[in-house]
Amino acid sequence: MKIQPRKPAGFTLIEIMMVVGLIGIMFTVGIPTFAKAHNQRPMRVATEELMEILHTARAQAIIQGATVELRINPQEYTFNVSVTGQSTELVERVESGSAATGKGRFQAKLPAEVGIELLDVNFVPYRDEESAGVHFYSNGTSEEFSVVIQSLQGEYRRLFVDPIT
């Protein structure tokens, strides 16, 4: 009777080392992409909150049939929406990052990693002022408004409100 040589079962050390090396290369290439996406989060949050509060101000002016003011404090990076001529805001303040009220956000605060680089209302700079106001009217028009925000990573975003929509 002839004994058959046994076929090796499993993987060789060289094959295992090749797979481990390939996995290492994939992680090396992929980690910077994940880190970059994570660093862009504050700018994305700030942009979304500003767009939401601008939309809320215009919508509330139309719905309420009254002039609504977006009050900006460039030194504290806060944005508040209120009906002009009334001392109280439309609703209690909603802190940045909390759940929106079904009616939209009436107050926003930029994340600590994002600052205001430029703030103009009707082409007048207000970046170094204590506060600035943008009026939204019941017919859907508004004052011209432009803001440029900058993150610590050097990203810039420009948001502006077209007076006539």
Image (tube, rainbow, N blue to C red):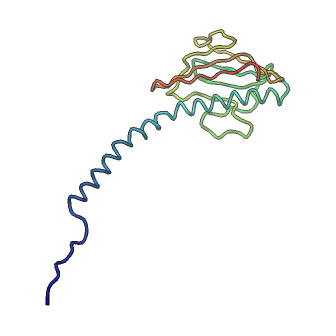
In this rendering, would 133 be left or right of 154? right
Q: Nearer the viewer, residue 112 or 63?
A: 63
Q: On the rendered structure, is 23 left or right of 147?
A: left
Residue 162 lies, in percent from the top left, at 71, 20
On the image, the x and y values in percent for residue 97 come to: 59, 36
Work out which residue is located at the far front of the displayed protein and give it.
Answer: 2
Classify the position of the C terminus by image quarter.
top right
Q: Quadrant of residue 70?
A: top right
Residue occupying image coordinates x 73% and y 40%: 102
| 91 lies above or below 83 | below
Q: In which quarter of the image is the N terminus?
A: bottom left
**Picture coordinates of residue 124, whole percent (x, y):** 65, 9
**Image spot of residue 50 (x, y percent):** 63, 28
Q: Quadrant of residue 135?
A: top right
User: Relative to 26, does residue 153 appear above or below in the rendering?
Assistant: above
**Residue shown at 57%/33% (left/top)?**
45
Residue lying at the far right of the rendered structure: 65
Query: Quick check: 22 left or right of 165?
Result: left
Number of marks present in the image shown: 0
